[in-house]
Structures are given as structure tokens and as C-alpha cells.
Amino acid sequence: MLAEQVKAGKLPPLEERLPKNPLVVEPFSKEGVFGGTLRTGKLDQNNNAIQDLATSGLVEWTKTDPPEPQPAMAESFEMLDGGKTYEFVLREGLKWSDGEPFTTKDLVYTYEKVLSNKDLTPDPPTWFVAGGKPGKITAVDDRTVRFTFDVPHGLLLSYLCHPAPAGQMWHPEHYLKQFHPDYIGEAEAEKRAKQNGFDTWMSYYEDRNSQWLNPERPGLGAWKLTEAPGASGHASAERNPYFWKVDPSGRQLPYIDKISFIFLEEDAFALRMANGDIDLSISAIGFKSVPLLLRNAEQNNYRVLRWKLDGSYNAVHVNQSHPDPVLRELYQNIDFRAGLSHAIDREEINQALLVGEGLIGHPCGTPGDPYYEEGMGMRFTEFDTDKANELLDAAGLTQRDDDNFRMRPDGKPLVLRALTFPSGNALPEIDVLEYAKRHWAEVGINMTIRNVSRELFYEEQQQGKYDLCGYSAAGYLWDTDPLWYVPTSVLTYWAPLYGEYTASGGDTGMKPEGVYAEIIELYEQLKRAADEDERLELGREILRKHDENVWIIGLARIPFSPVVASNNLVNVREDAVFSFRTGLPAATEPAQLFFQGS
């Protein structure tokens, strides 16, 4: 594909497109052949599907379990000053997908014009903060860049391996400066935004900076968007001629020329997979579709792989920061949460929804995560209605109404409002919550379920007024996405207002106290710990708090994460961890995938 463009004079030869020292990728099975179009897709076209397939980082995870940071676009890196400074040396000759040089100037632009711009970044991202203050990015020369912090930042390398922070690093100055007021003036920036249908220059800038919405934006990954998702329900991408990875023979990756994305509802997507119309699907498969996929695998030339879990819990997050003081005191009572947990017949859920293969436990990390300790997450998981009733009585819920439902401690009706949405998780939350609703009714707990759209869910969730949140919980490499176990964000579903307080520096939200403040401080110490053993002990102590308190009640857990791959697709990892923090498809290094016989 690219050789023809070189011959026609549209591209420079390979040696001028590659960096001087490209990253060599060892294929999982064997070196490949070039060509073909990878058919894949998502349930939600608003989800940046190119990010996982075409991620790029200064450092990237090794393909080991657990993974470790390794050189990527930076050919070397070094921790200095006890973890306060990190120095990265870029590969010489890196280029954007349009052929323009990628240098430390682009990283300094990201720091000065994006991360330090209050309009574009009102609050600095978590990964860029240590000791409560954001870091600085400075260029030593065109290839050497330094990240500096006032205190040690023990997690920076892990954060930079995470696809989300990695995606926030790449702002092509030569392209984006035409939308930034520091270059064209605020009046002109607002004018261009209005001309293109945007209310503010910031929203127009973010649209133009999106590698998922703007095919014109240069990128650094293996493929570059050519058709943005829209009314057609499709999107497409093609190979980046300046990609910086090669195979052991020195041939530029990726092997596959193009990617075709489709976006469908889960049942329709499952049918397309069962018909053999999808080459690779890692994040669009519900567990209920597994029997259908297994039945049709042989005749339609694909295989169903069983990747390890990143949590994959269906759980109930009990709101510890409820604005109603009576309910907050109740929900913070361990007897109440233990009573709810004992009332759940998890075996019935397992047989009905997971054909008896489900796992039992509360989210406390997950096996394989460096912080996990064997036996965590099993408190109060026995189905015991007598014990549940005893504990709920002990929590002060002794009064009942005419329908035998328990009353609040202040004598008012108690109705637990559970908020959820169709998230696309392998086991739909609403299916599991309906069982919990029936089980809790048996012990006098009245629950209502609001299964709303994604947009409405996040609008209501961030107000923090709900009682329960029906959602999953992560467990693998959670230290770079701490909101699951530490109230660092309003998206900490079990303590949203505490998380809002932390994220805003105390400007908004509710001040955490006691054990909630304690785990926030433990996490701050974890981030500052440059010593790995110290960091591991701090993370384990956070998980021990969850094991003890069960703020997130596990209801069901799928036994594996199903992955569908065409039998013609070579170099797919047979066994990996399904985790957003490792990039989902990135766990199998998509650039080295190829089609047998293409």
C-alpha cells in the first residue's frame, strides 16, 4: 500500500519515515504479511475506538502479567531526585502521521497551552498532580524532556502507560495552533468556533483535537482516522505511514492496512459476530451472547477466547456521602451493608444469568493485581436471611409499614433508589438489580430501580443524591484509576460528594472524615512513594479497608471476559487481562496482528 505511494512520489521512502532507532515489536506468534481490513466495532459510537487500537505513549506496558512500564516513543527514561523528576529521551526522527516532526516542543505545548490553560483544563488531571500540585514539563533539547513535581510521584510511569493519560499528552502544535487564542487571538478563535457551529473556542478546539471525530488531526498511533463515526453507523481508519514501530525484520508496522468500525446494539452485534462478520471484538460482547458465539464458532471460522478479568463485577455502590444526614448515617452503618449483602441469593443469580459459572465476592482489587491479597472480598457473602434480618434490625430498621417494608430510623418510609444505565458491560446491571430488588424485599427493604440513558445517569450521578448505584467496579491496576476505591472524583460511585470535595480542593462537595479521609491520605502517600514495596503496602491497606467495610456490595461476577477473533487473524494473545488500564485491544499489540494468506 505504502510502496505504491512512494513510487508515485506521494510519500518519502521508508528510511525517511521511520525514526533512527524504531521500537522493535516481537510478534506473539510469528512475523506477518501486509494487507487487509480489520472488521471490528463497538456498542457505543461515542466511545473512542481508535484510542485502544492505536495508542501511543512515551512509555507503554510490557505484555506480561502484571505488566511493567517499558520504553516506547521515549527510547529511554530515568527517575531522578527521589521521584520528583523524570527525564525522557525521545527517539530521534519521530513524526506525526502527516510527516511533521514530533519533538519536545509538542510536549511543552501540551503543558503550556492545554494543561495550564484554565479554559481547556479547569482542574489539572489526576495523573499530573502530586502533593496536591500539578507538575511542570520542560524541554532540555528537541529530544529530552523533563517532568518535575514538588514531591515524589511514584505512579507517573504507570499513569503514562494508561491509554487515557497517554491520549491527553499528544497535541500537535503545528496543527492545533490555528484554533488556539494564544496564537490567533481570542476574538478570532471565537469567530472560527461560531462559524463552525460551536458555542465557544474551547469546544471547537476539543472537537478539532479529537482523534475520533476529526480525520484531519495528525496522530502518532498505528492507524489514523479516515471517516469519523456518524449517522452511517460506521467509521474507518488506515495505516499511519510514519508509525515508529517495526517487526524484527525491520518492516514497518502495522501489518493491517485498514480498520472498519461498526456500531450496533448488543444483540445485533452478537449476531454479526456469530455470522463471522467481525474479525476482532474485545469490548462489545455480553456474557449472555457466549453460548450463541460458541455454537457458531467452528462453522463461521472464528474462536472465542477467555481473557482474564479486570474486576467485571456487577455491584451495588452504597452512597456513603448521601446529603440526607439520616440516610448517610444509616448507609455508613456496617450492619446495614452487611444485612443487605447477606440477603442476596448469589447462587440464584449465578445459575440464572451466568449458567452456574459466575464468581462470588466484593470488589477488593482482583487476582493478578499487585495489591490484591488472597481471600479479600468474601465478608457477608453467605445467603442468610435470618442473619440479614438480625443485622438490619441492629442498624435501627425495626419499624415496618403496612406492606412489611422497613421504615427509616426517623420513622419515614425507606425506599432505596438505585441508579443505573445500559453500560455495555458483559452482564447488564439491570438484570442483576432485579434479582437484588426481589431478594431485599424478602427482608423488608424496598428498592426502586432507575435504568436511564448514559447521559442522564451521569447528570444525576454527579449530583450525589441517589442511595445506590448499580455499576461495575475495576480491580486490575486500579492505582492509576483510583476513584473505584478512593474518593478522588465525583465518579467515585460509593462516595460521590467526598470525591467531589477531594477533586475540587474543598471548594465543592462534602468534606470526608474518619476512615474516608484516611484512605484518601493513604492514596496520597501511595502516589508519593517512589519505593515499590512501600507503595504496595499502602495500596493493600486501602483494599483492606474495603474488605472490612464493604462499601461496594458484589452481586455477580462473570468468570471471564469473552474475546472473539477470526481464525484467519494471527498474533492475537490467547490469554490476557481485559482491562481499560492496559487498553483492551492494546493488550494484544494490534500493530502486529495480520491475516493469514492476505
Image (tube, grey):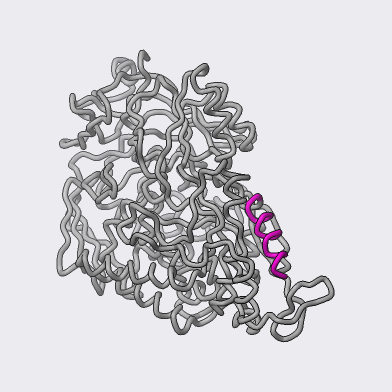
Name the image quarter holding residue 238: top left
Using the image as rendered, state which of residue 187 and residue 305 is in the foreground. 305
Residue lying farthest to the bottom in this orientation:
410
Q: Is residue 503 above or below residue 258?
A: below
Q: In the image shown, does 266 or 175 lie closer to the viewer?
A: 266
In the image: residue 318, left or right of residue 52: right
| Image side of residue 392 versus residue 60, left or right | right
- Picture quarter with the N terminus: top left
Instruction: Decide: is 558 above or below 278.
Output: below
- Which residue reaches farthest front? 386
Where residue 569 appears, x then y in whole percent?
39, 23
111 lies left or right of 325: left
Given residues 1 and 69, the one toward you in this image is: 69
- On the image, the x and y values in percent for residue 50 come to 45, 39
The correct choice, above or below, for 503 with respect to 420 in the image is below
Q: Is residue 113 visible?
A: no
First to last magenta residue range? 431-444
Identify the residue shown where x is 27% and y is 69%: 537
Quadrant location of the C terminus in the rendered image: top left
Residue sitting at the far top = 597
Question: In the visual, does 282 lie left or right of 31?
Answer: right
Q: Main secondary structure of the magenta part?
A: helix
**Residue 381 location, x and y as percent?**
52, 62
Residue 511 in the image, given as x and y percentages of width and height: 50, 82
The picture quadrant where one finds residue 259 is top left
Point 40% across, 59% down: residue:
365
